[in-house]
Image (cartoon, rainbow, N blue to C red):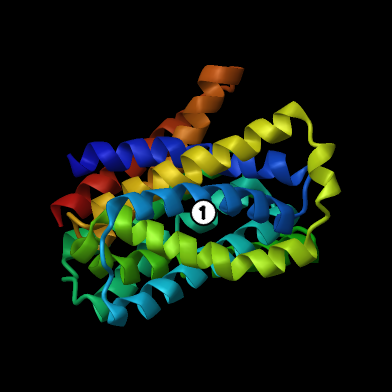
Amino acid sequence: MVHLVMLLHSVISAGTYLAAKRALGELSPFEVALARFTLAGLVFGLLLWSRHVRIERRDLLGLGLLGFVAVPLNQGFFLAGLAWSTPGHAALLYALTPIFVFLFARVRLGERATALKVLGIGVAFAGVLVVLGARGSVALGGSSRMLAGDLLMLLAVVAWAIFAVGGKVYAERYGPVVSTSAAIVAGTVLYLPVGFVASDLHRFARLSPAGWAALLYLVVFTSVVAYLLYYWSLARAEASRVAIWSNLQPVLTALLAWGLYGDRLTGPFLAGGAMVLAGVVLTERG
C-alpha cells in the first residue's frame, strides 16, 4: 500500500516544478508562497480543528519548528531558487533528497545502512542524471544568478529532508493528518508577517487564468494532498524508503510532457528511467 501511495505522491509532485515556474512568471516568490500557504494553512487548520486531538505540550515546540523548516525555509529557498534557475535543475537537486534523508535518518532515527539500500540510492540518482541529460534539462555552467538559484534550492532540499525525518515520530504518534496539519499551520503563521510585508497584493488582481491554475495546483495538490500522502507513508515505513520514491518525479514529468505535448522519448531517457526504477526496487529490498 505504501508503494501505491508514494507512486501517487510522485505523480502529483511531478507537476510541481512546472506549476511553480509558471506562477513565478507573474508573481514573486514571496507572493507565490503567501497565496499557497495562506490557503493551504486554512485547509490544514480546518482539518486540525475537526480532529479534536490534544497535542502534548512537549510536542508543540517540535511541530512548530518543523513548520518553520517546511514553510519559511523549505518553500522560501525553493521558490526563490526556482525564480533564478530552471525546473530541470530543481528536479536534479531534489533527486538528492533520498541521500540527505538517509543520512539524517541514520543519525536521528538509527535506520540501518544496508548495502542494497546504499546501492539503490546511488543507482536511482545516477538514473536521474541520465534522464535529465537525455532531455537537455541540465547543463553545466550558467550565470552566477543561476548558480545562486541552485544553491538556494539545495538548501531547500536539506530543509525538506529535515522536515521528513523530524516529522516521522509525530506522524507515528498523532497520525499523518494531525502532524502535517499542525506543522503547516505553525509554519504558515510564522511566514504570514514576512509574506504580507514583502508582497505586492495588487499583482493578484492582474494574475492570468493560467497563473491562477498554477497556484491552485500548488495549493490543492502539492501543498495539501502530497503532504498528507508523504506523512501517511512516513508513519508506516522507513524515511529513506519513502524518500527514494521522489526520484521518480523527473521520469514522470517527462512522461507527462510526452503524453500532453508530444515530447520525444529517447533511448537514453528510457535507460535512465529503468535505472531509477531499479534504484527504487533495490532501496525497498534493502
Comparing 24 with 251, the one in front is 24
Q: Position of residue 133 (x, y in %)?
A: 56, 43
Give the structural element (helix, strand or loop) at label 1. helix
Comparing 41 with 94, the one in front is 41
Instruction: Give the residue at mark 1.
Output: 41
Which residue is at a point 76% across and 58% down the rendered structure image?
142
Q: Image quarter for residue 143?
A: bottom right
Q: How many marks?
A: 1
Seen in the picture, residue 141 relative to 202 is either above or below; the reply is: below
Q: Is residue 82 left or right of residue 131?
A: right
Comparing 261 with 83, the one in front is 83
Which residue is at a point 59% across and 53% down the rendered structure image?
38
Q: Position of residue 92 (x, y in %)?
A: 53, 53
Q: Position of residue 12 (x, y in %)?
A: 44, 37
Residue 241 in view in this figure: yes
Residue 119 in view in this figure: no
Q: Image quarter for residue 283?
A: bottom left
Which residue is at a point 41% across and 42% down the rendered structure image?
225
Q: Amino acid at mark 1?
A: Gly
